[in-house]
């Protein structure tokens, strides 16, 4: 299963007039990062709002010589083609991507359908109802290092979200090669043997306690469990 964890940075919050200035993507195969990424900055041809600048630090002067979104669109589409998108707060990024797609010349790419996107914010809200579920809070909850995240950055946030996403799904053991850990044949055989072996339960009653219990049971005329014991052949 191929998934692309995606994040964007923008000039502000309204996709009708604001623009994407950074796109970052991380490829997952079966919930494991492959090392393949996509990262581009874009010239928005408009000023970055001061509030947005405080979040991501991408200034007008830094973006001035970057390509337009139209110039990176085909590379982006090729990278995400055929994969399920994984996004935190998907309506925001999908709204901006679809607005950028709509500005492209014909033939334009099809709009992204929000219901086809995995929204990790929705997953987090279901799993941790009533708690803070922004990316920083989720990193804290799952012990994911975010010390390098002094500013928001699309690729860095996508990489961190990829780790958070796996934790939201229940986590996965990984080896030093970052691949899934396979149980050894000996371990599998040992666990199977333990599962098949009859379980023996040790009583914590003393002999005196068992004797008192037997004496008590003897005073009962027709205990309700007697029929079950006789049918099963126990006792």
Image (cartoon, rainbow, N blue to C red):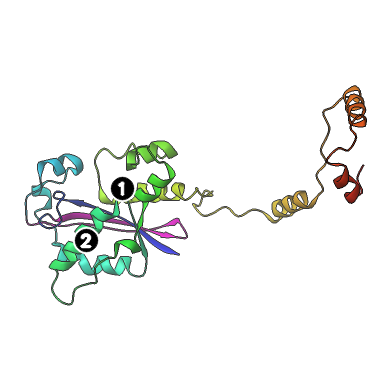
Residue 39 painted magenta? yes
Residue at image mark 2:
97
**Comparing marks 1 and 2, which lies closer to the viewer?**
2
Q: Quadrant of residue 51?
A: top left
Q: Quadrant of residue 74?
A: bottom left
Residue 157 image label: 1
Residue 232 painted magenta? no
Location of residue 144 with respect to 35 vertically, above or below: above
| Quadrant into which the N terminus falls | bottom left
The prevailing secondary structure element of the residues shown in magenta is strand
The spot of residue 119 in percent (x, y) is 35, 54
Residue under the point 16% across and 67% down:
102
> What is the distance, in whole Å, between disc 1 and disc 2 at their CAs?
17 Å
Residue under the point 78% across and 52% down:
196
Q: Disc count in the image?
A: 2
In the rendered structure, which disc, 1 or 2, sits on the residue that comes first in sequence? 2
Label 1 residue SS: helix
As drawn, the residue found furthest toward the top would be 208
The spot of residue 216 in percent (x, y) is 89, 27
The part of the chain drawn in magenta is 19-45
């Amino acid at each position: 299963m191929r998934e692309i964890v995606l994040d964007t940075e923008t000039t502000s919050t309204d996709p009708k007039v604001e623009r994407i200035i950074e796109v970052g993507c991380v490829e997952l195969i079966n919930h494991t990062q492959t090392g393949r990424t996509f990262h581009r900055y874009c010239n928005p041809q408009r000023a970055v709002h001061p509030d947005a600048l405080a979040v991501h630090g991408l200034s007008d002067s830094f973006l001035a010589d970057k390509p337009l979104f139209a110039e990176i669109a085909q590379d982006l589409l090729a990278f995400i083609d055929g994969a399920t998108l994984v996004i935190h707060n998907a309506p925001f990024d999908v709204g901006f991507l679809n607005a950028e797609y709509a500005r492209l010349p014909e033939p334009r790419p099809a709009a992204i359908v929000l219901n086809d996107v995995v929204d990790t914010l929705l997953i987090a809200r279901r799993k941790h109802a009533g708690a803070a579920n922004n990316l920083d809070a989720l990193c804290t909850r799952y012990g994911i290092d975010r010390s390098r995240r002094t500013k928001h950055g699309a690729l860095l946030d996508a990489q961190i979200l990829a780790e958070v996403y796996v934790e939201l799904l229940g986590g996965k053991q990984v080896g030093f090669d970052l691949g899934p850990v396979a149980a050894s044949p000996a371990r599998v055989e040992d666990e199977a043997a333990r599962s098949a072996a009859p379980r023996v339960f040790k009583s914590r009653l003393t002999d005196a306690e068992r004797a008192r219990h037997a004496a008590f049971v003897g005073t009962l005329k027709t205990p309700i469990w007697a029929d079950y014991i006789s049918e099963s052949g126990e006792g």
